[in-house]
Image: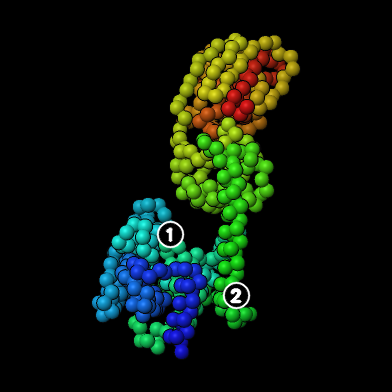
Amino acid sequence: MMENNLLHTVKQTVAKYNMIAPNETIVVGVSGGADSMALLHLLLQLQKEWHLTLIVAHVNHCLRGEESDRDQRLVEDVCRRWGVPCRVKKDDILSMSRAAGRGVEEFARGFRYAFFQQTAPHPIEGKIATAHTADDNAETVLLNMVRGTGVTGLGGILPAGRVIRPLIECSREMIEQYCERHQIPYVTDSTNLQDDYRRNRIRHHVIPCLKQQNPSFLKAVTRMCDANRRDSDFLLGLGKELLEQSRREQGLDVVVLRKAHDVPLTYAIKYWLRSVGLEESAYHIEKIKALIHKGYGKCSLGGPREAQVSGGLLQSVIATEKTMDFSFAIAKKSGVYALLEKSATVTVEQAQNIHNSVTYNQLDCDTIGTQLVFRNRRAGDSITLPGRPRKSLKKLLNERKIPAWERSRLLILADENGVLWVEGIGAALRAAPTAQTRTIFHISINNTLME
């Protein structure tokens, strides 16, 4: 009965999520493990009924030496005996991931799916079938909970799309019994037996405890995931509506977004990030929300992309690594100097009221040199602030949490002896006014970008 139960469950799952249409080509990812071997066997049973074309794709990651080669040989041998076309990709994933500066697991997954897509006869048509099970789904939900997640993360592994998971409602126990009954050969990845990875620790220790509390735990997780995916789709729809309401020719209207409730705003940003091909992380979403409510500024979205709020619009832009260096010589007298989007007004007068603020700063005119320049930051710049030890500007700006995109735009006043003053931070100790100061050098900054 086990094979009938499993086949019946797979048919129900395929119909429930509308996974497969007649006459489709399906690339089946087969690792050689019990799950993927059972998936291939089941699809072969359904091949004639559904008029399917099946192609097996196997990736040898070369991560386990001879064991990896053993897996490849098994898959190739079974495909020959079962009459299924088999495509194999073999590469040194460890070296490739190190060269790319990425984690091995993350890189291997991306490499695998890229090969599956390349194996398909058409770049956008046909399906890719993977052997994710109900156990895999439960593990993913728990991992998402450990990291901190919302409704979308509690939706677990997506059952269908171009990638389909016909075993997503089947337990691993059912699958192993199916393999035993049908004498389907399979291999066991030795790393799955170790507790070196977080997923393995959840698999070996957490899920067994939860199954003791509820023997139907996997079914309960499946129901929860279905409900959360429906909720997530509904909320994403609200976000999409808000996004369309705010859409303008050059970006998104910040005023419209700012007036929205936090939930549709969250999903609007999530949908926007997805639409421009960027990561939908909670960190980036909160950063963008802060920009929307602030009304200006930028934040990194990873890689070369930034979210920018300027002129009432939210936009995705390519980050510039460095603003072009600028330097403007000035004299110890009143004047207005246009620098990028800012202007610096300098006045010199007798000392009366000595005070400092972010946009109105004073220096002791008699202590500064004669070769004065307004410029942006340079490598090696440092400053000694009153009451503090000498520090590099780089370290000081890090401590003040000034965003990287702002740093090369900050105005600096320097003389022949180094940095005298930094916009938003103030004057160096050697130029700071004291009770003996007779003449004040005032700097006032007008940042037209912020108005």
Whole-number angstrom distance, CA of label 1 to CA of label 2: 28 Å
Residue at horizontal 38 percent and vertical 61 percent from the top: 113
Q: Position of residue 279 (x, y in %)?
A: 50, 51
Q: For this rendering, which residue is in front, 90 or 351?
A: 90
Q: Secondary structure at mark 2?
A: helix
Amino acid at pointer 1: Glu
Q: Nearer the viewer, mark 1 or mark 2?
A: 2
- Give the number of the disc on residue 220: 2
User: Residue 73 at x, y = what percent?
Assistant: 27, 74
Residue sitting at 50 percent across and 31 percent down? 408
Q: Which residue is mark 1?
A: 106
Query: Is residue 69 in view?
Result: no
Q: Name the kind of residue labelled 2 in the image.
A: Ala
Q: Is residue 273 above or below residue 17?
A: above
Q: Secondary structure at mark 1?
A: helix
Q: Which mark is residue 350?
A: none
* Mark toward the start of the polypeptide (1 vs 2): 1
Q: Which of the two residues, 416 or 197, is positioned nearer the viewer here?
A: 197
Q: Position of residue 268 (x, y in %)?
A: 58, 49
